Image (cartoon, grey):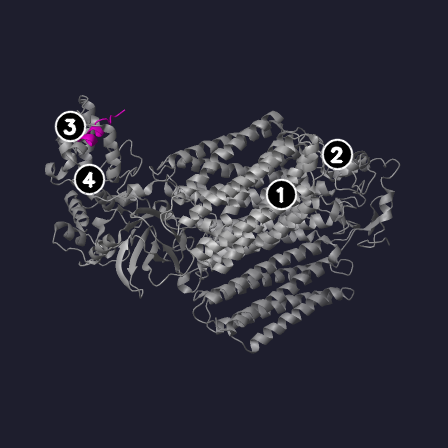
């Protein structure tokens, strides 16, 4: 529950200072979306572009690209995000998000998609 | 006496018509005055078919639009995979309501309404024989239907699918009152449908214009006759089914609960014994309308008239042997599957006969491509396509794949839209000039047709494919990535196109439909009596019919009718009246005085609806009050009946004197009572079927108490029959004797019922114990209901005696009450005998 | 959900009804094409007759416009077509509804709201193995599936392997299926069964016989009970009241057996891919994924506990 509050706070922070547009070289956001769907990330997250499922456990990822922090704690930078996507507990031991089976290249694709999710 | 006459009527009397000479002054004015429409708010009390028929069609079309809006909401939800227009539970309510409203509140009432509106005109009657019953049926349907529909806005709408299979609809899996809305709401609307059917049967058989023997009966009237007969046979089954399920829900009597010896399959048998004939019940009147309009539009008699009539009868007959084709995937035994499969295919033969009769008619005439013409052609194509997928689904192994998928959704919409909706729209365009002072617009009509025709195919053709692609029906969503996106999106576009067509029709109606005044006349050059010049009193005089297409064959008919040169040019009794003729040859038998507008039937409808609705929301005390009030209103309404007029005989034209009072088999009341008892008998027959079905499924053997009580019950019922029969025989004696015999009959059946029930309870059978307890008590409840009605009738007779209304000059009431008591006694014997019969043999 | 673990099995194209994969579905495919051809033929006859009736020159129309047309085209022609079809249909019905043979593999599938309870039986009908939401079969062997239900009516349908058959409380129906090729075949509930009916799917997985034997041997083993935080969380959270994990104290029967849940192809009855992430999402709030299903949401678990539990369940291979 606390993490949700933090995410909300992060959203406010994001409004205050818009981070610069970030991309990941060599990664394919389209491929990333396909991976998000095949992995079922929607089981926990509402993700723009994913119709179903729209889980509520992990919070919405709408406007993720404009957020300053990942999970309210880590700077929202591409390399951190890629690491996070592969093994969140390594960064935040108390997170509910389990490690995934994504390869580094796959995690980069997913990160690239998430970084296309702007507020408007 | 003339040769071959049915009633001894001298047919040379027909040669006196058309009469010569001028009609007396003031005659027409009197006719207008007597039949004038109600003013202002009194339109509610109207009972003339010119009003009630229009209200009735209008209400049916209202429900068509409402259920259509639900369809659009569903299509919006299914336009995209995992769409979020509707949450799952709302979607499940919406599809249940769409099916239920379309089937029960639109399709059956719409065709029944068409009958009420058209039949008196087509038959040359001033009105159907029970105008107040029609009005009652209409109001009950409108009030009940609207309340039922509104349940959707409170989240209380049923969500078990339109065939409401238990155990999903039992209290365990549907604990709310949603399912009760369906069971009580629909059960109640069925009663209104049956009332309409009685009206139509008696109307077609007894109020035809003189000379309109069965071979000159318009094809639409044939269709309505078979239609009404099928309602009488089929609807009791669903009345029983809904009653049993409601009893299971409310009182925990296990008819369908497999854990206590019930069987969910019983519901399916009862439901589909009604449900499949229902489809033909909807189709037949529409087919009758097609067979009326195609000759008119092509300006030539229907080719194969008799083959089409026989096709109606064959459809009616075979359709009762096909119900289990909805159950091919339930694991029925192979032999019965074969029979039902064969019957399901056979039922397409009469449809083939009709289709080719229409094509042959088109060929022999010259088709006009006006709006009704376009709709009948569109109907023919769509219906054939639906029929073909129907033949596919009648093939058992194919049905194993297609059943409960979108393939079936496509099939049933092709059949119903092609077989009923398009003919109905053709009928609306074709017959509007008969009731409205302006015809509908040909230009808008074409738009309506093409949008509906294109939208229909766009919406439903892809569904065949999505079914084969594995999309089950009744799903609130589907997964992406299964290639279902495209067919579903196309279907949605088609549905909205179809709706656009309907919208244009609504605009057309608003702009041009002006009923209750003068009419636009015979703009399509139709051949039937309904195109005679008419006002609210119907035709000025009732013609002698000499051909199947009187307006084409008797060129001066319209003029002579309008000049009052046929039967009943005025109102000889000074009130509303129509001719009663014999069922086969339509020979004049007597004059039937008809009621004037009054509010009692409206109040009766309000309180009947109130009873059922209050029961649904479990306001039991209020519902009983409402039932008492409804009964009071019905008694007040009946009180006006059976009053002989001062004029015993009147001149109905050209010096023919007819009696103004009738009883027994020549009277309309007798026919109505007999048909009502046939309905009751069908419910009884279906409950006997249920008893035997559950008994054959039961693992434990059932027993039944046999003893002195059994003999006593049988004897009391037999004596009751004797009393009921004697009551009308001794009318010439002091009325007291008749009244005593009537009361005795009522008391005897009540006593017999009570003893039988006590015997069962003494044997330790309780209704919630097992299926036998449930079904025995259900039969007892059914008999108890009849005993109660019989008691009310006995009290009614006593009241009439106190007012001096019992005597040899008015035997009708006593005869009808006697018939009823005799039936109740016979029913008591059956409910006594069947459990004893099927208990003795081990299952 | 465009792609899933059992992705290849969920394609709608070619339509599964027209893409049979075994002897109980192949004749239905032939029949479907035959019926479609019949329908097309009759439609052409009607269209041609109607076109002539509408537009042909007067003498032609006159010849068409008599009762002869009704006798020939409306009655005679359909009688012939329908008789042929009826013979075909009934003989196929008999052939396909033969009783189970002694060599058939026996599996009992019970419809539940809204998932599938699967039990593998021995020749005498005793239950050998419990599983849920997927059915493993050996290629080339007929499987007699005993269909039952304890709540409402469901219908078992794997279009590529056979037609559908209902599961009715108080009755037992037997459906025979056989897969001729290894692969996954999607199935779903075809009879409306309330709430989450639309999301009540399953898969049939056909293995080569030796693979099937290997699968079976592994499946019959109890869970490898390694002490882990996840196992403790599972036990403390009371999951065992509804779920069974053989070899542990969890012995509930209301929900699916989880003894080898980690090796399942799907979660939530054929709707989600199976991995630690979806498992966590399902446990924490299955209601957001499959509204109305009987498993309550567990939002009280801490992040670590949730992760531990899903890791534990995923380890049950």
- Of tags 4 and 2, the one toward the viewer is 2
Q: Chain of mark 1?
A: C
Front one among B465 and A113: B465
For mark 3, give the secondary structure: helix
Residue occupied by mark 3: A78
The quadrant where residue A60 appears: top left
Secondary structure under the numbered disc 1 in the rendered image: helix
Q: Chain of mark 3?
A: A
Query: How much space separates mark 4 and mark 2, taking CA atoms?
Result: 79 Å
Name the residue rendered at 74%, 53% in the picture: B643
Residue B48: tell me if it is visible: no
Residue range in magenta is A108-120
Alpha-carbon span between mark 4 and mark 1? 73 Å
| Crowd band around label 1 with a 10 angstrom C-alpha radius: few (<14), some (14–19), many (20+) | many
Q: Earlier in the sequence, mark 4 or mark 3?
A: 4
Q: Is residue A116 magenta?
A: yes
Using the numbered discs, state the Cα–Cα distance from disc 3 to disc 2 in whole angstroms: 85 Å
Question: Looking at the image, which is closer to me, B56 or B424?
Answer: B424
Label 1 belongs to which residue?
C73
- Cα separation between marks 4 and 3: 26 Å
Q: Which mark is residue B664?
A: none
Foreground label between 2 and 1: 1
Residue at screen point 29% across, 59% down: C120
Q: CA distance from mark 2 to mark 1?
A: 40 Å
Residue at the spot of label 4: A1
- Residue ranking furthest to the right: B21
């Amino acid at each position: 529950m606390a993490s949700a509050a933090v995410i909300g706070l992060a959203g406010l922070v994001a409004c205050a200072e818009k981070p610069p547009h970030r991309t990941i070289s060599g990664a394919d956001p389209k491929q990333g979306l396909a991976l998000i769907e095949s992995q079922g990330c929607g089981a926990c997250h509402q993700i723009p572009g994913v119709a179903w499922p729209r889980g509520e456990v992990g919070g919405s990822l709408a406007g993720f690209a404009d957020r300053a922090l990942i999970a309210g704690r880590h700077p929202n930078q591409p390399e951190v995000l890629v690491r996070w996507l592969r093994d969140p507990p390594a960064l935040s031991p108390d997170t509910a998000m389990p490690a995934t089976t994504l390869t580094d290249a796959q995690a980069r694709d997913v990160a690239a998609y998430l970084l296309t999710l702007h507020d408007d | 006496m003339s040769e071959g006459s049915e009633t001894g009527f001298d047919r040379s009397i027909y040669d006196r018509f058309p009469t010569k000479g001028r009609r007396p002054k003031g005659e027409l004015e009197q006719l207008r005055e007597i039949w004038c429409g109600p003013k202002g708010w009194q339109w509610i009390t109207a009972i003339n078919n010119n009003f009630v028929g229009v209200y009735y069609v209008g209400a049916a079309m209202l429900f068509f639009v409402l259920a259509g809006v639900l369809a659009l909401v569903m299509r919006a939800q299914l336009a995209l995979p995992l769409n979020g227009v509707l949450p799952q539970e709302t979607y499940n309510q919406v599809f249940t309501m769409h099916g239920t409203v379309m089937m029960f509140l639109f399709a059956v009432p719409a065709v029944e309404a068409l009958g009420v509106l058209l039949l008196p005109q087509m038959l040359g009657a001033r009105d159907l024989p029970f105008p107040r019953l029609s009005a009652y049926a209409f109001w009950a349907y409108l009030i009940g239907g609207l309340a039922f529909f509104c349940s959707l806005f409170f989240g209380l709408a049923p969500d078990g699918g339109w065939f409401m299979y238990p155990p999903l609809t039992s209290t365990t899996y549907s604990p709310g009152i949603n399912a009760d809305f369906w069971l009580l709401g629909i059960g109640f609307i069925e009663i209104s449908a049956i009332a309409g059917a009685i009206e139509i049967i008696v109307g077609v058989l007894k109020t035809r214009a003189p000379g309109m023997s069965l071979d000159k009966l318009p094809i639409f009237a044939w269709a309505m006759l078979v239609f009404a007969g099928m309602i009488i046979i089929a609807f009791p089954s669903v009345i029983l089914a809904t009653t049993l399920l409601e009893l299971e829900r409310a009182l925990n009597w296990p008819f369908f609960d497999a854990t206590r010896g019930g069987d969910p399959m019983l519901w399916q048998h009862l439901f589909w014994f009604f449900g499949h004939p229902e489809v033909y019940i909807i189709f037949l009147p529409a087919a009758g309308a097609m067979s009326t309009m195609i000759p008119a539009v092509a300006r030539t008699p229907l080719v194969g008239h008799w083959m089409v009539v026989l096709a109606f009868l064959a459809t009616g007959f075979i359709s009762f042997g096909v119900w289990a084709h909805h159950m091919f995937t339930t694991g029925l035994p192979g032999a019965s599957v074969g029979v039902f499969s064969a019957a399901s295919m056979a039922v397409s033969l009469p449809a083939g006969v009709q289709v080719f009769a229409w094509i042959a008619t088109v060929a022999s005439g010259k088709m006009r491509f006006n709006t009704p013409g376009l709709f009948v052609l569109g109907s023919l194509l769509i219906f054939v396509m639906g029929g073909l997928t129907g033949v596919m689904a009648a093939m058992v192994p194919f049905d194993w794949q297609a059943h409960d998928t979108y393939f079936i959704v496509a099939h049933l919409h092709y059949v119903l839209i092609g077989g009923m909706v398009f003919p109905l729209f053709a009928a609306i365009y074709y017959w509007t000039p008969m009731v409205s002072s302006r015809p509908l617009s040909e230009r808008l009509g074409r738009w309506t047709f093409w949008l509906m025709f294109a939208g229909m195919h766009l919406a439903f053709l892809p569904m065949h494919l999505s079914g084969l692609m594995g999309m089950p029906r009744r799903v609130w969503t589907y997964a992406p990535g299964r290639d279902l996106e495209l067919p579903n999106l196309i279907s949605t576009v088609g549905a909205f196109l179809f709706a656009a067509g309907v919208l244009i029709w609504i605009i057309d109606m608003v702009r041009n439909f002006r009923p209750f005044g003068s009419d636009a006349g015979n703009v399509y050059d139709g051949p039937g009596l309904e195109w005679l010049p008419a006002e609210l009193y119907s035709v000025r005089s009732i013609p002698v019919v000499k051909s199947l297409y009187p307006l084409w064959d008797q060129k001066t008919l319209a003029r002579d009718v309008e000049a009052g040169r046929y039967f009943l040019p005025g109102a000889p009794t000074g009130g509303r009246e129509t001719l009663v003729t014999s069922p086969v040859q339509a020979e004049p038998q007597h004059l039937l005085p008809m009621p004037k507008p009054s509010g009692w039937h409206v109040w009766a409808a309000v309180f009947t609806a109130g009873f059922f609705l209050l029961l649904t929301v479990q306001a039991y005390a209020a519902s009983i009050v409402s039932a008492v009030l409804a009964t009071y209103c019905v008694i007040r309404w009946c009180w006006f009946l059976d009053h002989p007029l001062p004029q015993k005989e009147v001149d109905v034209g050209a010096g023919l004197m007819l009696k103004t009072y009738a009883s027994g088999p020549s009277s309309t009341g007798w026919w109505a009572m007999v048909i009502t008892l046939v309905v009751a008998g069908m419910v009884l027959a279906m409950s006997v079927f249920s008893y035997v079905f559950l008994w054959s499924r039961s693992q434990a053997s059932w027993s039944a108490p046999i003893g002195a009580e059994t003999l006593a019950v049988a004897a009391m019922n037999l004596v009751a029959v004797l009393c009921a029969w004697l009551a009308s025989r001794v009318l010439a004696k002091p009325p007291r004797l008749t009244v005593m015999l009537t009361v005795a009959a009522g008391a005897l059946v009540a006593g017999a019922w009570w003893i039988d029930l006590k015997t069962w309870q003494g044997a330790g059978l309780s209704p919630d114990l097992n299926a036998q307890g449930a079904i025995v008590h259900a039969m007892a409840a059914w008999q108890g209901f009849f005993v109660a009605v019989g008691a009310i009738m006995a009290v009614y007779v006593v009241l009439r005696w106190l007012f001096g209304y019992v005597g040899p000059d008015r035997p009708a009431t006593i005869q009808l009450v006697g018939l009823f008591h005799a039936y109740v006694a016979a029913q008591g014997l059956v409910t006594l005998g069947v459990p004893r019969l099927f208990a003795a043999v081990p299952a | 959900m465009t792609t899933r673990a059992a992705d290849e099995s969920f394609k709608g194209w070619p339509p599964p009804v027209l893409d049979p994969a075994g002897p109980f579905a192949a004749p239905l495919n032939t029949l479907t094409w035959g019926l479609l051809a019949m329908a097309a033929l009759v439609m052409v006859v009607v269209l041609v007759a109607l076109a002539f009736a509408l537009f042909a020159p007067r003498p032609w129309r006159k010849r068409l416009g008599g009762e002869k047309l009704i006798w020939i085209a409306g009655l005679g022609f359909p009688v012939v077509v329908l008789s042929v079809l009826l013979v075909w249909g009934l003989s196929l019905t008999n052939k396909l509804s033969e009783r189970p043979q002694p060599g058939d593999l026996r599996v009992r599938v019970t419809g539940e709201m809204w998932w599938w309870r699967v039990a593998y039986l021995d020749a005498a009908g005793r239950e050998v193995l419990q599983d849920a939401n997927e059915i493993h079969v050996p290629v080339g062997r007929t499987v007699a599936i005993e269909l039952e239900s304890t709540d409402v009516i469901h219908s078992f349908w794997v279009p590529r392997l056979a037609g559908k058959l209902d599961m009715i409380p108080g009755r037992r129906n037997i459906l025979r299926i056989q897969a001729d090729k290894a692969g996954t075949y999607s199935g779903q509930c075809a009879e409306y069964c309330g709430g989450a009916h639309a999301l009540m799917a399953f898969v049939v997985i056909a293995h080569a016989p030796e693979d099937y034997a290997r699968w079976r041997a592994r499946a019959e083993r109890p869970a490898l009970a390694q002490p882990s935080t996840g196992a403790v969380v599972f036990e403390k959270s009371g999951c065992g009241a509804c779920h069974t994990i053989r070899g542990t104290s969890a012995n509930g029967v209301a929900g699916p057996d989880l003894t080898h849940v980690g090796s399942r192809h799907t979660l939530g009855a054929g709707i989600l891919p199976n991995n630690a992430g979806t498992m966590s999402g399902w446990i924490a709030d299955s209601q957001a994924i499959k509204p109305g299903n009987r498993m309550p949401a567990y939002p009280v678990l801490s992040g670590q506990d949730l992760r531990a539990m899903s890791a534990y369940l995923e380890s049950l291979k």
